[in-house]
Each structure stands twice: as C-alpha cells, then as structure tokens.
Amino acid sequence: MAFRAKCRITGVHSFNSLHKDADGKTPIESMQVTLQPVFGGGDDDANKQWSKWTPSGELRLQITNPAIFPELVNGKTFFVDFSPAD
C-alpha cells in the first residue's frame, strides 16, 4: 500500500560532506534537511485526513544535489510519497 505524507522543513544545515567527489580530493557540499509531518489541516481536508493516522515523526535527509538547494527552505512544505520497493 502506498501513501503520501505532507511534510514541512524544520531544519536546514549546510556543510561539506565527509564524502569526496570522483577525484577523491574535493569535499562534496551537502545539505542536511529535517522534515516533520504537517498535522491538523485547517481548511486542508486531505491533510486533515492523512495526519489523523500520522500525527508525528521526523525524516532527516542528506542531500548532495546542488540544483535543489534553493528549494530547501525552513517552513516550506513538500509531499513525500511512500510506496513498496519490492
């Protein structure tokens, strides 16, 4: 069964990763992003329904794709889709 969670960014931290790029010398810039489920919903009936079953939690991601760094802003919301991988 697949489901979708609406999450809000609650923390963004920029740093050089311990990983190196292909040359083995240059640190990779990365962003650590923390997201938490948006619960309640006010006027958002879809959010109100899903958050009834997932009222809390935290997701932390280490992202090294600089193309999306500008999108990683505290308070911004995203949908996170979960579906079986097997």
Image (cartoon, rainbow, N blue to C red):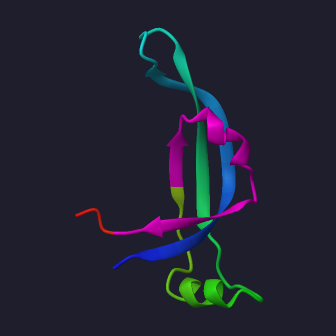
What residue lies at 64% left-to-right and 42% top-to-bottom? Answer: 68
Is 12 displayed left or right of 55 in the figure?
Answer: right
Question: Residue 46 lies in what quarter of the image?
Answer: bottom right
Q: Which of 83 and 10 is in front in this view?
A: 83
Total labels: the figure holds 0
Question: Residue 37 lies in what quarter of the image?
Answer: bottom right
Q: In this view, does 12 lie above or below 74?
A: above
Q: Is residue 81 magenta?
A: yes
Q: Which of 82 and 16 is in front in this view?
A: 82
Q: Is residue 18 above or below residue 85?
A: above
Q: Does the magenta stretch include residue 1?
A: no
Percent of width and height locating residue 73: 74, 50
Q: Give the range drawn in magenta.
A: 60-83
Residue furthest out toward the front: 67
Q: In this view, does 61 lie above or below 5?
A: above
What residue lies at 66% left-to-right and 34% top-to-bottom? Answer: 14
Percent of width and height locating residue 86: 22, 64
What residue lies at 67% left-to-right and 40% top-to-bottom? Answer: 69
Quadrant where the image shows the N terminus: bottom left
Q: Which of 71 and 39 is in front in this view?
A: 71
Is 1 displayed left or right of 53 in the figure?
Answer: left
